[in-house]
Amino acid sequence: MDLDLPNTEDAQPRPLSILIIGGGIGGLSAAISLRQNGHHVMDKSNLSSDSGAALHLCPNASGILHRWGINAQNFGPSFMSRYIERAQDGRTLKDVDLAESNARWPYPWQMVHRASFHQELKRVAASGEGGGVPVALLPKHRVIDVDPQLGATLEDGKLVPADVILGADGIYSRTRQVIKTLPLFRTGKAAFRFVLPKSMAESDPTTAPLIIPKDTFTLWFADDRRVVMYPCHNNEWLNFVCIHPDTESRTAPTDEWNKESSLDQVLHVFRDFDPQLLALFTKANAATIKVWQLLDMDTLPTWTSGKFALMGDAAHPCLPYQAQGGAQAIEDAAALAAVLPLGTTPAEVPERLKLYETIRSKRAFRIQEYSRLTGQDWVDGQPVVGMREFEEYNFDHDEIANATAAFKEWMMAKQQQTPAATPPIAAEPSTGLERR
Ligand SMILES: Cc1cc2nc3c(=O)[nH]c(=O)nc-3n(C[C@H](O)[C@H](O)[C@H](O)COP(=O)(O)OP(=O)(O)OC[C@H]3O[C@@H](n4cnc5c(N)ncnc54)[C@H](O)[C@@H]3O)c2cc1C
């Protein structure tokens, strides 16, 4: 599809043509933020829906979504109100009411069903909500090559030119090769993922005590494996992430994120856990149980080349232990919008993308590192680093405000260096600092 760009001689600033490769959390978030800036956005993806069961939208992500006009009530959030840690035999190690600590964050800590969330991102991207031209969402368009000076080539050989090209194609990114070919490597862990209806657990007196009260996040720990359970979809579903040594579920690196697994396999890997929890597992729809290998990657030397930039898991894949991978992709999208206001010219794009990387890389790499630390096996029945250890750093961050301030500062410094040659700031991106 060719973009219908307005005449460049119009008095109005010319929107950039932006091509996003990948329609996951990162790609759709960038599509929303950049079209709300007034740019013309196409999103080409080879998948129409996000995979996996549920995810946390931590306060740092919730705040950005809120200011883009994305209302969590449309996709049935559960709220993280209580945190329980148990030993593998079911003994309670910690039971924390989060009401007081959550009051520190200006936006809520939510747990949502992935498919519903993804559906809402697609709906908002394809709408005009919040301003701008609806995004051209083109699922089933696999990109096979990127020329960072020109555009991207699709499977049918067609070259799609653009002013900005974003590689948002996830951990198995193909577009990453534009920067560097980096192998993914095993972390030694894999995760079973599945959901089950909460009502089934509630109606069984054996399992009911495990899921009361509502809005509770529970972790069962053994030294080298753990089970995470939390509600989603208006508290109607329970989501499970069961992390274990990957050798026990015989996963292998694959270009598919998720592979079929079975209830027998889950019950076998967690056979030494509390029988109440195993009884809960048996209520899952066995056909929906999948297993993910948890992979990692070395740090890329850069995320950008010419008019091309990587974002989300393609740039900085995040292990799930801090529940921040999707949030970091959302923060990338917020920063991209801050450095690419309407009025940015195609010639300015490469330096703006470099600025985006400067703004984002330190924080994204640090959160990757925190996640690695949190995922370490327990030693002598104690965590090396607790799951809630880095909350302050993770949650108390406003990437819209941060990137907007960094962009302003950068523009001022640039103007001071070359006062005659540098145009004034074209359009002030909205800080949207209004709160709930
Ligand atoms: C077990 C587990 C639990 C997690 N829990 C959380 C959590 O609670 N909170 C959180 O914030 N994050 C969580 N994450 C991380 C989060 O899921 C990812 O970080 C996030 O999905 C990354 O988004 P993305 O858009 O970068 O990539 P993806 O979601 O992987 O999207 C990439 C998209 O690109 C498409 N694509 C791939 N190749 C091509 C191509 N050649 N051409 C066109 N399209 C292509 C794919 O089909 C896909 O649609 C978890 C991850 C795991 C594994």
Image: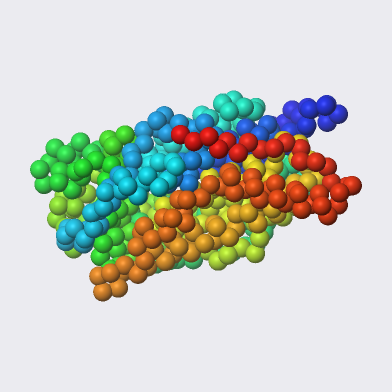
Location of the N terminus (image quadrant): top right
Q: Residue furthest right?
A: 420
Residue under the image location 44 percent in, 36 percent down: 117
Residue occupying the point 29% across, 60% down = 226
Residue 115 can be seen, yes or no: yes
Q: Indicate the position of residue 263 as horizontal and vertical percent values.
A: 25, 51
Q: Is residue 172 above or below residue 17?
A: below
Q: Quadrant of residue 133?
A: top right
Does residue 244 lie above or below 216 as drawn? below
> Which of 243/428 is in front?
428
In the image as oriented, which residue stretches furthest toward the bottom?
Answer: 380
- Residue 396, position in %: x, y? 47, 51
User: In this image, 307 relative to 93: left or right?
Assistant: right
Pick out the residue farthest to the left. Answer: 205
Give coordinates of residue 9: x percent, y percent: 86, 29
Instruction: State the residue in front, 220 or 343.
Output: 343
Residue occupying image coordinates x 42% and y 34%: 72
Q: Quadrant of residue 274?
A: bottom left
Using residue 4 as the reference point, say whether residue 391 is left or right of it.
left
Q: State the image coordinates of residue 146 (x, y, percent, origin top left).
A: 69, 49
Judging from the image, the colouring scheme is: rainbow
